[in-house]
Image: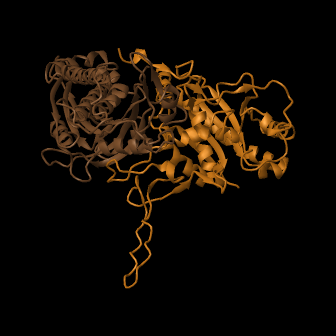
Amino acid sequence: MTEAVFRETAADPRTQAVPLSHLSLEVGHLYMEDFEAGPARLREHFAQVRPWAAAARAAAEARSGGRRPRISTCFLVDDYFTRFSTPAELVPQLLEEAERAGLVIDYLARESGCAVSGTVPVAEAVAGRIVESPPPGSYGNRPPAAQTGWLANGERSPAPRTPQAMKTAAAWQPPRETAARRHSVFLDAELWSDDAQGNRTWSCPFLAAVWQLGRLGLLRHRGAPVFTPRPHDTDRFPDDWDELPPLIRLNPRADPFAAYRTCSVLPNRFLPVEHAVRVVLDQTEVDRTALRQVAERSAREHLDVPDSVADRVSYVFYAGS
Amino acid sequence: MAKARQPDTTPHTVLACGEVRTCLLPARQALDSRSAAALLALRADEHVLLSERPNLYARSPEVLTGVDCPLPSADGARVRAVGTVAARAALTEGRVLQTSAYARLPAAGPGARQPWGHYLVRPGMVEPLGKLPHEAVAQGVLDGGRPGDLDVGLIADGLLTRLLRHPLLDHDPPLRSRPTRLRWVALPAEGDDGPSIERFTLAEDELRTVRLRIPEGTSPADVAGLCDDLALHDWLLTTVVRMLDGIALGGPPARRGPGAAPHRPVVAALRPAVDHLLHLWMPRARVARQLAPLWEALEDSPGFTRQWQTLVQRIRDQLALHAIASVQREVEPAG
């Protein structure tokens, strides 16, 4: 009488599940300037990552209770903010340097795929799922975050009013982190900016949050998984970044791309970016069915997965820029 | 559509509450399915649910609003609660727009506010800090809280305001009507009792309040669906009653001189009801099976459908009388 009469707008109404590893291990997230600095920079990066990658694997093994954990590695190339060289030139170099350090890159992703993946406006969809953490006193009267393009982890300082003649200016009020323990660490992250023509540029932390949700297997577009790896079985890569699929599987024997948890090994300079990622993840309502699928699957495997999505994400920050 | 069930790490629901806004879609033409889907596409990545049987109906995905505030309470207790209120919009026959906001509340919650991620994996749940005096809060919700208390009606209002800005709407409705509000609470039924309506009140202004008892395990989304259905039909009754109130029926048509068509005002006033409203009456079209008996209680008393049929008959009789009158005038000699 109730739900059975619904017809959904797409041919396939089901929310598809995605295969899941135990851990998605990110062994790099580099910008074009890193590539511009030449192979030595990549060599140094992978040499730094290697021991931490081994530690992350050991931790995943300890969590899986002695069974061999399924772990996939991934690497994100920024082709969104700047473009440099070509995949044909860069990707073989990248793989060579990883191999030299004894690392295997299972999956390679392009950052612009976190903005729009194929025809799917992923970033826009995730922005539509932001549910702002309400400061105390929110009784249903909050304006939606989507109008401002900024997301904070608490209450901003009240905007100073222009003092009228004969009146003194109001005293400054501090911002406040909603989850503060006595003292605040207030963070206000810019999610996007629009130029004069109305073209939107998503911010690096926002795209990185989308990337994390993809790695956690929690993104869907009208029920279909968003980051579906395309196999890449040849040594040849295209001459244009746009011709490279948003996510490719380089290692045919790789464990699934998406995982219950993620770990990213990154240089220190990513610390503020990843703090902002956490602020975004902590205030994003993910697809409910995808969330349930992960919960059911992990329960069947007797694996402990944190309730809160932001707590499924971990990092190693190594010294360096 | 399978509803996602979240990992059940929270105590069971002892109170659900919500508010529905119902209004005529402010557009000259009713929207077809495609336009309805465009209007209700609150999220780029989720479907709008569309249904054509037994009538044309579209429903938006749910969106959440975070709250952290005291709960309204009849006994003055100030219980703080934190969580998310779910809201959705629906369009019936491309003509009647409804927004509905609701939340469920467990018997008890953590003693302190949790990280926000805790609440986002429990969508549509508002957790009290400590124990919930659910009877007092239920009454508080129906009475309307003090300023600063949880107000799910504001969330339904906010969603309605957002939808009314949509470029598909020309704000040229075919008839005059007023929006209504329906505020509801649902408390657990005693023992093995089935669902029941304890009270249905036509309060001041355009406000109706409903107090329900529901068996444990009833989905709050289903209860919200029932209340949307009640609100839709109550709005239809209210609108048609007001329409008939507003026109002088019966009696000899006032003489306005030769050539005037004195029957026109009545026909013109009633015609929009025929064009846009009379086919909308379809109680229980989308009410969950286990809650359908609640409608029967309202059919018994005050008798929703009985009143509707009487109204429809009056409209048809009036139109028939005016049709006869106009035929007679045509055959009478001009004088």
Residue at the image position 15 percent from the left and 36 percent from the top: B135
Left or right placement of residue A192 versus residue B39 in this view: right
Name the residue furthest bottom.
A166
Q: Is the residue B332 above or below the residue B159 in the image? A: above
Quadrant location of the N terminus of chain A?
top left
Residue at the image position 39 percent from the left and 39 percent from the top: B119
**Chain B representation colour:** brown
Residue B16 seen from this side? no
Q: Is the residue A292 above or below the residue A281 in the image? A: above
Residue B230, quarter of the rendered image: top left
Residue toward you, B35 or A161:
B35
Quadrant location of the C terminus of chain A?
bottom right
- Give coordinates of residue A111: x percent, y percent: 69, 42
- Give coordinates of residue A270: x percent, y percent: 64, 52
- Give coordinates of residue A79: x percent, y percent: 75, 44
Left or right placement of residue B120 versus residue A75 in this view: left
Residue toward you, A248 or A132:
A132
The mark tally for this picture is 0
Residue toward you, A307 or B164:
B164
- Give coordinates of residue B21: x percent, y percent: 32, 38
Residue toward you, B70 or B326:
B326
Residue B184, quarter of the rendered image: top left
**Chain A representation colour:** orange
Left or right placement of residue A133 versus residue B210 in this view: right
